[in-house]
Image (spheres, rainbow, N blue to C red):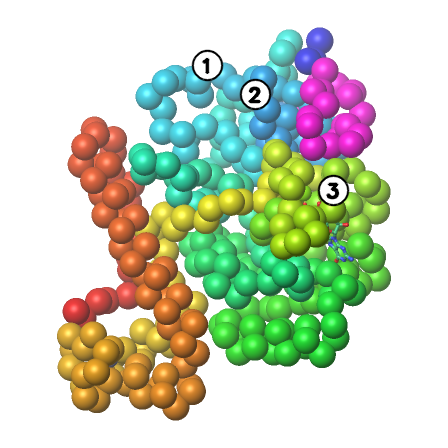
Amino acid sequence: MLAPIEASANTQTDSSDGQSPAMATASTQSPPALQRVGWQGALPSLPPGHMLTRVSAQHRAGYEVHDGEHAFNVQPAPKFLKRNLDPAARPAVGDFVIIETGAPPHIVEVLPRRGVFERAAAGEKYQRQIIATNIDVVCVLTGLDGDFNPARIERYLALVEGSGARAVVVLTKCDMADAAEANAAIDALRKRLPADTPVVAINGKDAASATALEAHLAPATTVALVGSSGAGKSTLTNTLLGEDRMATAATRAGDDRGRHTTTHRALLPLPRGACLIDTPGMRELKLTGDEELELFDDIDALTEQCRFADCGHGNEPGCAVREALDAGELDHDRWRHYLKLRDQREEQAARFEDRLRGSHEPIRPQRHRGWQERE
Ligand SMILES: Nc1nc2c(ncn2[C@@H]2O[C@H](COP(=O)(O)OP(=O)(O)OP(=O)(O)O)[C@@H](O)[C@H]2O)c(=O)[nH]1
Ligand SMILES: [Mg+2]
Ligand SMILES: [Zn+2]
């Protein structure tokens, strides 16, 4: 017997019909079904009694996987529970996993990830936390209300870089905002962000308005929704699903902050063929140290033009940054935020190296950093 699906705290109704996967094996699994959970390409050939599924949720008691038709509970094989195992080697939401269909079924293998969206975990010890894997699009949600914060959007964009996904900035609650103020905020944001980052404003409660996201929801695409609590991730999830599956809650009156209603990540196939990962609002968004900060490439180029290679961009003569700031060509806030993110990136990279030196863990290959500090 399969373990019954645990009713998770954040779902109003169960995300599955509780049926067994009918013990489908590789020969009976169909690519169209798996595409509903984001599988792209042909199916791998698997031995009898094995099937390909995707991790749709993680609970204290195990994992929930989805085969494109049903969600059901599985256990990780003992090798995933070993204490010394790098947490990154454990199954995570978004992973395609091979399960052995037994009683109970077990995850026996995690297929290589084509991308990982992660952040550094809060706390003393340097640790990375996987938000989701194998994502094509990360929608960064921000309400056009008191919670609107361009710097936070930039921080999300920095984390999306290197995840294998492309970012789409989704501004919610456009129905609640004063139209002129909202348009001014959107214009300023578009100027501040890289030109190739789409910025879409929607009313997440309205299906017609949410069609503005259609271009990013092609079949077999995996879209993760991230953003602060109260930004409207679960509201948009329900609208795109066409049913109220995820719990939502009103934000606080004073500051428009959310109440951390969603507590677990959940992967849900959409009726139109893409699949969505709703995530809990994140309190802290620490860089991992691996970020390239490509969204500030123009600032890097500018610093190259300073007369002195070791320009501190203060009162040095011939400082291209200062000139751009004075001429209004470089936004002061954006410059300050760039310095802040760059400092955190360096600090986190140093902490990561310390951790590697202090342990016997194999060193993860570091991505090449295009960014060269001349100081
Ligand atoms: N008018 C309007 N209200 C919205 C919109 N999007 C979300 N809301 C409301 O904002 C509140 C918070 O929405 P949620 O969907 O629960 O927010 P969330 O991002 O899932 O929050 P957490 O689960 O706490 O991370 C709810 O009361 C929603 O009805 C929108 O586009 N327009
Ligand atoms: Mg939510
Ligand atoms: Zn300078």
Type of residue at label 2?
Answer: Arg
Residue located farthest toward the front when viewing the structure as drawn: 254
Label placed on residue 137: none
> Is the C-beta of the residue carrying label 3 under 8 Å from the nearest atom of ligand 1?
yes
Measuring from the top left, give residue 48's x and y in whole percent: 61, 18
Q: Which residue is mark 1?
A: 78
Q: Tell me if residue 281 comes above or below residue 321 in the rendering.
A: above
Look at the numbered disc 3 and give the secondary structure of its residue: loop
Could you say whether the residue bearing mark 1 is in a helix, strand or loop?
Answer: helix
Q: Is residue 100 visible?
A: no
Residue at label 3? 248
Q: Residues within 10 Å of mark 2 (few under 14, many from 20)?
A: few
Q: Looking at numbered disc 3 in the image, what kind of residue is underneath it?
A: Thr
Q: Amino acid at mark 1?
A: Pro
Q: Which residues are magenta?
A: 4-26
- Image x and y of residue 87, in percent: 40, 30
Q: Is residue 210 visible?
A: yes
Taking the magenta stretch, the answer to whether it contains residue 17 is yes
The answer to which quarter of the image holds residue 333 is bottom left
Q: Which mark is residue 60?
A: 2
Q: Check if residue 122 falls in the magenta segment.
A: no
Q: Considering only vertical position in the picture, is 239 above or below 37?
A: below
Estimate how packed mark 3 is, as few (under 14), some (14 to 19) or many (20 or more) residues with alpha carbons within 10 Å.
many
